Image (cartoon, helix red, strand yellow):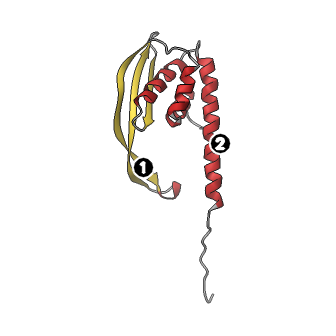
């Protein structure tokens, strides 16, 4: 992802991860660190936009359900998360992980776990892209009487 900060990258990876994957990352920590929930997981909707042909004009595709959460760790670091769906536990764990990733101490094992998640997500995107490419049909126009 060019032009993005490392934090933007890991937040995107955490947002795309499943609850099971987030819980697996969190289980590597043992007990969750002390934290205050500043904004409890709350669910709302966001408008999803699309582009005609992937690069054309924008249009409103529809609404998606999103859950967000904000926590403050014991050292004052704030963690945020947004996740598709209504899973409050996933949002809270992702916010705690975001806060921990901003630090130095406990972040090393988490960083490697997030890197593994990123690799799995990229592999899934590549596979989906290959499957779609295999069904691609090229249409062309024949000119009659030219």
Q: Which residue is mark 1?
A: 49
Q: Quadrant of residue 119?
A: top right
Front residue of 46 and 21: 21
- Residue nearest the observer in this picture, 92 or 49: 92
Q: What residue is drawn where x is 55% and y is 31%?
A: 21
Q: Quadrant of residue 120?
A: top right
Residue 5 image label? none
Q: Secondary structure at mark 2?
A: helix
- Count of marks, rendered view: 2
Q: Secondary structure at mark 1?
A: strand
Residue drawn 52% across and 58% down? 53
Q: Which residue is mark 2?
A: 123
Q: Which residue appears at 39% of the width and 30% of the height?
A: 68
Q: Position of residue 45 (x, y in %)?
A: 35, 41
Left or right: residue 55 compared with residue 132: left
Q: Earlier in the sequence, mark 1 or mark 2?
A: 1
């Amino acid at each position: 992802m060019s032009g993005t900060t490392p934090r933007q990258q890991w937040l995107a990876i955490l947002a795309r991860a499943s609850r099971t994957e987030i819980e697996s990352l969190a289980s590597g920590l043992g007990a969750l660190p002390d934290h205050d929930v500043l904004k409890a997981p709350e669910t709302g909707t966001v408008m999803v936009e699309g582009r005609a042909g992937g690069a054309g004009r924008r249009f409103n595709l529809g609404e998606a359900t999103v859950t967000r959460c904000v926590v403050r760790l014991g050292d004052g670091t704030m963690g945020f998360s947004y996740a598709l769906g209504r899973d409050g536990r996933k949002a809270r764990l992702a916010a705690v992980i975001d806060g921990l990733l901003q630090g130095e101490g406990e972040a090393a094992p988490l960083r490697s776990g997030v890197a593994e998640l990123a690799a799995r997500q990229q592999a899934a995107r590549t596979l989906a892209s290959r499957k779609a490419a295999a069904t691609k049909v090229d249409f062309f126009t024949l000119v009659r009487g030219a």
